[in-house]
Image: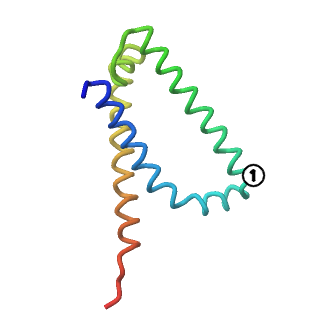
Amino acid sequence: MNLRASWLTASFLLVNTALGVGILNFPAAYDQAGGIFYATLIQGIMVTLMLSTMLILAYCSDVNGDMTYHDVLLSMCGKKGQQLAAVSITLTLYCVCIATLIVIGDQIDNRE
């Protein structure tokens, strides 16, 4: 497996983990957003923004010849931007781990 394939696999695993935990909260989030119409509208906007972000990252990667996300950040945002993104990714992973532990804790049967 080459480097690009391993980064792609790691990215999909991260997204799958975050969505796996987050999808359990969709019914409550839909209710708080005002119903299925508004929640779907908000999700459509978010998907559009995410796709735009991915296209911008791909363009920047092609222009600068970067192979990884962190290389793109270094060439476009500098060292401080790269470090800020690393901290953001670390906090996101930490929060996903906490959410997973909460879901596991909620599913444990406490009957004695």
Looking at the image, which residue is at 36% across and 57% down? 98
The residue positioned 68% from the left and 51% from the top of the image is: 39
Residue 58 position within the rendered picture, expressed as x and y whole percent measured from the top left: 47, 19
In the picture provided, is 13 more to the left or to the right than 35?
Answer: left
User: Residue 68 appears at what percent x and percent y?
Assistant: 34, 22
**Vertical placement of residue 14 versus 2, above or below:** below
Label 1 neighbour load within 10 Å: few <14, some 14-19, many 20+: few
Relative height, residue 63 to residue 89 (above, below)? above
Q: Circle 1 is placed at which residue position? A: 37
Who's the residue at 37% across and 43% down the image? Answer: 14
Split into 4 quadrants, where in the image is the C terminus? Answer: bottom left
**Residue 24 horizontal side relative to residue 14, left or right:** right
Residue toward you, 56 or 98? 56
Task: State the residue in front, 16 or 110.
Answer: 16
Q: Say which residue appears at 43% left-offset and 11% top-offset.
A: 62
Q: Quadrant of the N terminus?
A: top left
Tell me which colouring the rendered structure shows.
Answer: rainbow
How many numbered markers are drawn? Answer: 1
- Up-down: is 51 above or below 64? below
Q: Callout 1, which amino acid?
A: Phe
Q: Position of residue 33 (x, y in %)?
A: 68, 55
Residue 92, x across and y down, in percent: 39, 44
Secondary structure category for the residue under label 1: helix
